[in-house]
Image: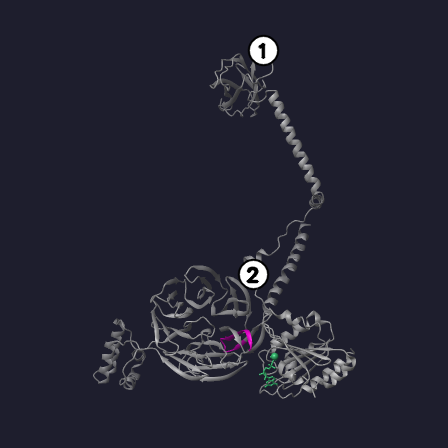
Amino acid sequence: MGLLDRLAGLLGLKKKEVHVLCLGLDNSGKTTIINKLKPSNAQTQDIVPTIGFNIEKFKTSSLSFTVFDMSGQGRYRNLWEHYYKEGMAIIFVVDSSDKLRMVVAKEELETLLNHPDIKHRRIPILFFANKMDVRDALSAVKVSQMMLLETIKDKPWHICASDGLKGEGLQEGVDWLQDQIQAMKI
Amino acid sequence: MTSSLGAVRGVQHRDEREPVSVERSNETNSKWLDAHYDPLANLYTFSSCTALLDLHRDGEAKLVVGDLGTGLCNMKLKVYKGTSLMTENALLDLPTGVVTFLMDQNEPRTPAVAVASGPYIYVYKNLRPYFKFTLPALDVNLLEQDVWNQAKQDMIDPMTLKEMLEGIRDKADVPLSVRSLRFLMLEQEEMESFVNLHKHHPIKRQTVITCMGTLKKNMADEDAVSCLVIGTESAEVLILDPEAFTILTKMNLPSVPAFLDVTGQYDVEFRITMACRNGSLYILRRDSKRPKYCIELSSQPVGLVRVQKNIVVGCSEETLHAYTQKGKKLWTVYLPSSITTMGLLDQKSRGFQAVMVGLASQEVHLYRDKNLLNIIRTPDVVTSVCFGRYGREDNTLIMTTKGGGLIIKILKRTAVFEEKDTSPGPPLAQGVKLSVPKKTKLYVDQTLRERENAVAMHRIFQADLYRLRLMAARAYVKALEGSVAPISSVQQEPLQMNAVVQGIGPKFKLTLNIQNTSINHPSIHLLISFLYDERLYSMENSFFKIPLLVPGLNYPIETFVDCLSDKGISDLIKVFVLREGKSAPLLTAHINMPVSEGLAAA
Ligand SMILES: Nc1nc2c(ncn2[C@@H]2O[C@H](COP(=O)(O)OP(=O)(O)O)[C@@H](O)[C@H]2O)c(=O)[nH]1
Ligand SMILES: [Mg+2]
């Protein structure tokens, strides 16, 4: 069925829920990717977006996903930061065809990594260099360079190129994330 | 000792100041993210020829640039998407303005791009040529026309034509056409062919567009239909209908406009501010064909930006002036270098507006009122600035440079411009700490004691105050009882006395004014006695009788006092009013004698 079956099954035995945060700039492809990951039996709770703040949630028997756009000018920032505490793994989606905003994505990542609820935790981060199908899109290596990912020393991270529309590259990323969550021994 | 102290203090000063300057430069850098820099973008333009718009209505704003090329060739209309050039269209002449506007209510509401170039406005929809507007031709000089007709019929040779045209040029009210002016610039050998090439075409006189803006038709909405507003070389302002491209309104100016700003709605009320080449600003309003206000600048305007309701104009003498929309001057800022371009920074999410000023010193300064909020250093002199939504980012700053470079910066989402003044000069100097002497131990101890014992100290003070008041009251009562006051309290003899001393010495005249204040009881058998230091003063008569005192009348009693001392000292003389046979006085007066000043002269 879904891409997350192995993880869900594994965690199902442990009877423990894992919260995954899926973040990135608006239009990076988060909703598209999450919809691909979503098992058919998942219950979706779409929260009506408040002005300037868009959040989606869904839950499987043992996994809960919180997806939100890192957008806007600060007024609503603390609203999404409020979810950092419960996150146990992060999926960070980057639009690799948006060269102009790569620097904004980098800035948002930096802010995320310096947040007190994230900073001192060994929380695994999976990066999707999404929209790899777009002509002139940056490679995963290039994205990782521009985002200065090699400077992340205290958290396990992984980047893979993806095509959210076709679902390409998602399995590789999710496999890595499952290994990380398993290793966390919850 | 002192020198070593001075040295130590000097070091401290440096320590205090350095972190401040570092902080400033960091702060400046940290407001902006460097999204893109292409020094070889080959983009030569001014702020008036750049615009941002959501061209394809896909949420991703594009940059439209009227590229001036080399000024002679390679003039193009370029469209950028993200970091790369998307399309380009050739332009026939130099662009003088690029604006985007909505022409009609039709769906989809695709914005049109208008490019002013020579006497034309090229309107593009979906980046395809849609309409070309031509400014109406101006009247030609009839004499000039006549002369060219003669040339056409070969009645005159080129040299005669030249002489006649020169004569017309020097006298006529109506200026010559461009063709005649070009002809007059030619060398003799080129004339013949020029005349043969052009003589069969009628002469035309055409003006050109110098600046262009937009004016909402009748709604204030962001996506309301807008009219085009243009300024021309013939010192006119035209407002064009957005659909029919007819001239809705024509207004005249005293000079050729170089920059314009438009606010309001055509059908309701509007203001057009024109910065003209004669060094004046003119403000036009809806119902007047002539400027309503005129602001005379001290030098040529080089940029014009409206911030909310105020007009900020940059001048060639390195100054920035602000005026209200009625022409009242608000402030002036002196800049470190000459202005290359100006633009508005409008951070809509925070309702924040400021003026961006490109300087020849390779900096862009950001002013909010007269406060310098931010400095952006650029690798080359900036010739155009444009701030707004670009791509999917709301607060993007796009700059082009003199060398044809393209710089894109994104305002950090967490950045807040502080209202404090960061300009160099006196305010900064005031921040330097003075070497105020250290608080002494005594001072500190005293302060501590005061802080700890405040209540007790207050109580003691209050007790002392009451005691003082009591003592004063007692002394007063005693004085009354002893009749040592100038008012007698004895019921039978109510008297009042005051004394006046006249003269500068050594001889003084003493006048005692005595009054019986009873209603009908005369005073008799009264005596006056003086008591004084006999080493200092002498009196002919220090004890005498006074006559009967009729109630209510004032009796001036005069006597003379000689001062015996030349040491410049003075003393009290006491006056007693006594009743015969009684030793206790009825009243007493103390006279403070002045210092004798006349002794030296005497
Ligand atoms: N070409 C391409 N488009 C994508 C891809 N992933 C998402 N998109 C498109 O990008 C746009 C934004 O996607 P969305 O999932 O809504 O982004 P979100 O704002 O991060 O949730 C949509 O039009 C998607 O169809 C991809 O891998 N390739
Ligand atoms: Mg989404």
Whether residues under marks 2 and 1 lie with C-beta atoms below 8 angstroms apart, the answer is: no
Please report the residue visible at 62 percent of the width from the left and 81 percent of the height from the top.
Answer: A31
Residue position marked by numbered label 2 in the rendering: B420
Which chain does the residue under circle 2 lie in?
B
Secondary structure category for the residue under label 2: loop
Q: Nearer the viewer, mark 2 or mark 1?
A: 1
Residue B404 among magenta residues:
yes
| Amino acid type, mark 2 | Lys
- Residue B360 in view of the camera: no
Secondary structure category for the residue under label 1: loop
| Amino acid type, mark 1 | Gly
Instruction: Give how far across and how far down residue A73 sits, in percent.
Output: 58, 70
Which chain does the residue under circle 1 lie in?
B
Please report the residue visible at 54 percent of the width from the left and 19 percent of the height from the top.
Answer: B494
Classify residue B562 as left or right of residue B300. Answer: right
Instruction: Give how far across and how far down residue B575 sits, in percent.
Output: 56, 19
Classify residue B453 as left or right of residue B253. Answer: right
The span shown in magenta is B392-407
Is B536 drawn above or below residue B447 in the view shown?
above
* Mark positioned earlier in the residue sequence (2 or 1): 2
Question: Which corner quadrant of the image does residue B586 belong to?
Answer: top right
Classify residue B503 as left or right of residue B446. Answer: left
Residue position marked by numbered label 1 in the rendering: B581
Image quadrant for the N terminus of chain A?
bottom right
